[in-house]
């Protein structure tokens, strides 16, 4: 029977019981990956312990919650080595209880401050803290602690060498950075750390590795409150990052400076950290630029007038010059686009090129079509980009082309229809000349497609999409009052996700009936004139749709979620605010 205690007493009891439970589980050879969950709970409880002097007036409610936690930790399953699954489930429940406790505390106007910094804190402050830790000798103690030994054991318990290599890549980022998922998977693909197999594309393998890193507790997903079921960014736990630095150094994967422990440039990989990195050689004495496999821009925001090393790259497969941060406010600017781009054509082995989010790039040089090995070209959010090369047909190995958020592009160049290996095409502009949607019908491997219908464009050619039998994700954005959907006959029945933005129709068109999209799992309609989801299809219900988003529909009046019996989650926000992509 649990005895009621004051919060300051209860938290000490909980920490003691947690310690015993962790020791019992460890002694009985429970999966060492569970150590992460124990450590997370311990950090949360210590954070609460520092807070309890402020919560006297909420003592009763808090005490009740502590009692529930105490009962959860007083469980004999922690002593049973055969109960690993049950232990994991129990720890998840305890973590949920802790979140409820924090929510209870946060109902008062006093901020809860745990004993670790929030993930969004800037790196410059982290660097100062780290230097203070060095002066106190704390940093070295962390690297030599028993907790770090357990983390190292959890790394070695990972059976897949592929997962280990991908995980080590994450050691390069500043502590507590919020990292965009997609550029990291592209990096893995470019270096060949993930590759396609008989059943999966290379990107799908990368997504699988990413999910394993979450499941095994190495990274923390950064959940978008607008779409809780979607994970597009993440944070590396600070202790995990320190563990990765140790392993990377021991195995010769990377070397690091003294705190703040930035990765050192080496024979195979170079990292841009300071503005003057773009003016001088990026390799150490005795090493050569022509041996580099990867160049990754970690922190340089202004790419200057001299980038002499770019022309010397001969074996590079990854050139990540663009933004990897989750925040679109992170600014990268090139002083002279010619000096950055003109030497790209000589990179015959380049597989991944990212210029994501770099401003002042108005056009790509014709020489870029000489990148015959290029598989991934990421130009997302290059807001000044006005045109692509006239003919891209020589880039036959291209599988991913992202030109989304390049709003000055008015049409697509010829030759795209000859890129038969394209799997992902984002930002296709349906204009009045050059390449059309009909031309894409030849690309049978296309799985993800996003289209922007301009003022001059007509959606009639969209009916040709029905021939893309492998298409799984489709986004259509309309701009301008002249856009129409009258000629649109059907969409591919293979679709799993459909995202419609700024829709020009008020009633649901026939191609958006449930029977026409039987396998659709995600339906997003964001912005536009739609007033109702009602339809005359004989099949009334969307039987496969699990995720629904209806946003910024100023004319929409009726909630008809009953048409979606399998909903797992949904969001309805009809407030007329500007549509965010």
Image: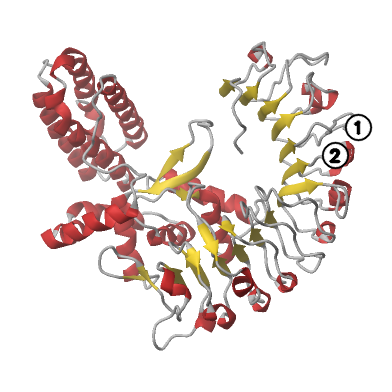
Find residue 452 and report its horizontal and vertical position in percent.
75, 42
Q: Is residue 8 above or below residue 182?
A: above
Residue that badge 1 annotates: 487
Report the number of discs.
2
Pointers 2 and 1 in contact (CB under 8 A)?
A: yes
Residue neighbourhood size for the residue with mark 1, other residues' Cα within 10 Å, grouped as few (<14), some (14–19), many (≥20): few
**Image quadrant in which the N terminus is located:** top left
Residue neighbourhood size for the residue with mark 2, other residues' Cα within 10 Å, grouped as few (<14), some (14–19), many (≥20): many
Q: Is residue 367 above or below residue 432?
A: below
Residue at 25% x, 64% y is 259
Residue at 57% x, 80% y is 313
Label 2's element? helix
Residue at 41% x, 89% y is 286
In which image quadrant can residue 2 be found? top left
Q: Indicate left or right for 214 with 345 as reference.
A: left
Of 511 and 3, which appears nearest the observer?
Answer: 511
Q: Is residue 503 above or below residue 144?
A: above
Label 1's element? loop
Residue that badge 2 annotates: 462
Find residue 117 and report its horizontal and vertical position in percent.
27, 43
Find residue 77 and report its horizontal and vertical position in percent.
26, 30
- Residue 152: in sight, yes or no? no
Q: Indicate left or right for 25 with 120 as reference.
A: left
Could you tell me how far apart the alpha carbons at marks 2 and 1 are, in whole angstroms? 8 Å
- Residue 432: in sight, yes or no? yes
Q: Indicate left or right for 208 with 11 as reference.
A: right
| Visual colour scheme | secondary structure
In which image quadrant can residue 494 be found? top right
**Image quadrant in which the C terminus is located:** top right
Of pointers 2 and 1, the one earlier in the residue sequence = 2
């Amino acid at each position: 029977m649990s005895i009621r205690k004051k919060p300051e007493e209860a938290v000490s009891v909980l920490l003691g019981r947690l310690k015993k439970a962790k020791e019992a589980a460890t002694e009985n050879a429970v999966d060492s990956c569970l150590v992460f969950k124990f450590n997370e709970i311990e950090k949360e409880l210590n954070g609460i312990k520092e807070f309890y002097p402020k919560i006297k007036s909420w003592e009763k409610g808090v005490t009740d919650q502590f009692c529930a936690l105490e009962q959860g930790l007083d469980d004999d399953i922690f002593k049973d080595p055969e109960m690993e699954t049950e232990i994991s489930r129990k720890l998840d429940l305890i973590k949920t209880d802790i979140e409820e406790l924090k929510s209870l505390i946060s109902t008062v106007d006093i901020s809860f401050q745990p004993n670790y910094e929030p993930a969004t804190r800037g790196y410059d402050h982290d660097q100062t803290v780290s230097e203070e830790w060095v002066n106190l000798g704390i940093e070295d103690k962390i690297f030599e602690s028993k907790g770090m030994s357990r983390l190292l054991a959890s790394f070695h318990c990972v059976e897949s060498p592929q997962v280990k290599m991908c995980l080590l890549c994450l050691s390069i980022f500043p502590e507590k950075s919020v990292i965009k998922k997609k550029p990291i998977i592209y990096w893995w693909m470019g270096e060949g750390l993930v590759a396609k197999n008989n059943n999966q594309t290379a990107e799908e393998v990368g997504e699988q590795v990413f999910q394993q890193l979450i499941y095994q507790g190495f990274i923390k997903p950064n959940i978008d409150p607008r779409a809780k079921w979607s994970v597009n960014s993440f944070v590396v736990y600070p202790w995990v990052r320190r563990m990765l630095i140790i392993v990377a150094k021991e195995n010769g994967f990377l070397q690091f400076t003294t705190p703040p422990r930035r990765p050192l440039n080496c024979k195979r990989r170079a990292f841009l950290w300071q503005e003057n990195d773009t003016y001088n050689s990026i390799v150490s004495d005795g090493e050569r630029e022509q041996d580099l496999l990867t160049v990754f821009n970690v922190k340089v925001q202004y790419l200057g007038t001299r980038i002499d090393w770019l022309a010397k790259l001969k074996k590079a497969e990854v050139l990540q010059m663009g933004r990897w941060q989750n925040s679109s406010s992170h600014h990268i600017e090139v002083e002279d686009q010619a000096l950055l781009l003109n030497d790209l054509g000589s990179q015959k082995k380049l597989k991944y090129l990212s210029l994501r989010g770099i401003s002042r790039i108005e056009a790509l040089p014709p020489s870029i079509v000489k990148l015959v090995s290029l598989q991934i070209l990421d130009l997302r959010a290059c807001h000044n980009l006005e045109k692509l090369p006239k003919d891209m047909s020589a880039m036959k190995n291209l599988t991913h082309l992202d030109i989304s958020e390049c709003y000055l592009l008015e049409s697509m160049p010829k030759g795209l229809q000859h890129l038969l290996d394209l799997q992902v095409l984002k930002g296709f502009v349906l204009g009045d000349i050059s390449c059309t949607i009909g031309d894409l019908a030849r690309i049978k491997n296309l799985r993800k497609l996003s289209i922007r219908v301009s003022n001059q464009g007509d959606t009639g050619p969209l009916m040709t999409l029905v021939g893309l039998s492998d298409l799984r994700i489709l986004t259509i954005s309309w701009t301008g009052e002249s856009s129409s959907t009258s000629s649109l006959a059907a969409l591919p029945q293979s679709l799993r996700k459909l995202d419609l933005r700024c829709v020009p129709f008020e009633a649901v068109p026939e191609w958006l009936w449930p029977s026409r999209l039987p396998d659709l799992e995600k339906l997003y309609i964001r912005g536009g004139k739609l007033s109702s989801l009602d339809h005359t299809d004989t099949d009334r219900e969307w039987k496969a749709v699990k995720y629904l988003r209806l946003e910024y529909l100023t004319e929409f009046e009726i909630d008809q979620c009953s048409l979606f019996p399998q909903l797992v989650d949904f969001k309805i926000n009809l407030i007329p605010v500007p549509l965010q992509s």
